[in-house]
Image (cartoon, rainbow, N blue to C red):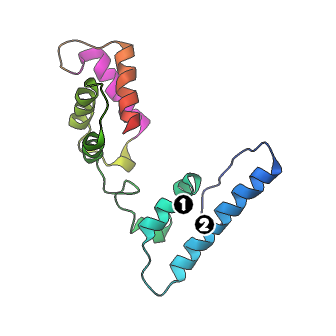
């Protein structure tokens, strides 16, 4: 579809590929119908119902950019997202709380859609050199745990 990013996926069989294409085509038709609708349509709910591959593609469409807000990361900061994650967190590893608190404190100002690999890389380097407490650097294994926890969020 004109104006959308290319989606490229490989399948083992042609029938799987046809089913995938059919689903995405139907969902794109729903989007077009919603754009033409005279009645208000909950575009955020429509977005959440889309296939994940299609979600990445349509975020920049004008009909979604104005309504997605927190869903697409346009307004949601990393600190808010970590708070939401920790509210639902119910596992045993209590170190996750401290790791994510460090991430929230250091990247509080960043919106989700602004976070890049460079931000994560800079944080890893800071952890390796000064650590999370500012006294001494942490091991590479510990930085992997920080990345894993951030990835979970």
Rendered view: 94 above or below 139 = below
Residue 105 found in image quarter: top left
Q: Mark 2 highlights which residue?
A: 27
The Cα–Cα distance between marks 1 and 2, rounded to whole angstroms, is 7 Å
In the rendered structure, find residue 93 and report the number of the disc placed on it: none
Mark 2 or mark 1, which is nearer the start of the sequence? 2
Say which of 70 and 26 sits in front.
26
Is 26 covered by the magenta stretch?
no
At horizontal 75% and vertical 52% (from top left) the residue drawn is 17
At horizontal 58% and vertical 75% (from top left) the residue drawn is 32
Q: Mark 1 highlights which residue?
A: 50
Secondary structure, magenta segment, majority class = helix
* Left or right, 55 with reference to 23: left
Say which of 18 and 72 sits in front.
18
Mark 1 and mark 2 residues within 8 Å of each other at the beta carbon: yes
At horizontal 77% and vertical 57% (from top left) the residue drawn is 18
Q: Where residue 145 sits: x, y (%)?
A: 37, 23
Which quadrant would the N terminus be assigned to in this image? bottom right
Residue 153 found in image quarter: top left
Q: Which contiguous range is marked in magenta?
A: 116-132
């Amino acid at each position: 579809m004109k104006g959308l990013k290319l989606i490229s996926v490989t399948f083992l069989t042609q029938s799987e590929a046809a089913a995938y294409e059919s689903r995405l085509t139907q969902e794109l038709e729903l989007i077009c119908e919603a754009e033409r609708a005279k009645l208000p349509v909950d575009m955020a709910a429509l977005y959440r119902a889309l296939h994940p591959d299609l979600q990445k593609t349509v975020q920049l469409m004008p009909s979604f950019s104005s309504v997605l807000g927190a869903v697409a990361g346009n307004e949601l900061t990393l600190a808010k997202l970590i708070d939401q994650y920790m509210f639902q967190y119910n596992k045993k590893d209590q170190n996750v709380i401290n790791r994510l608190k460090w991430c929230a404190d250091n990247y509080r100002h960043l919106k989700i859609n602004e976070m890049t690999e460079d931000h994560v890389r800079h944080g890893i380097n800071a952890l390796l050199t000064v650590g999370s407490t500012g006294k001494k650097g942490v091991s590479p294994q510990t930085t992997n745990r920080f990345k894993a926890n951030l990835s979970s969020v």
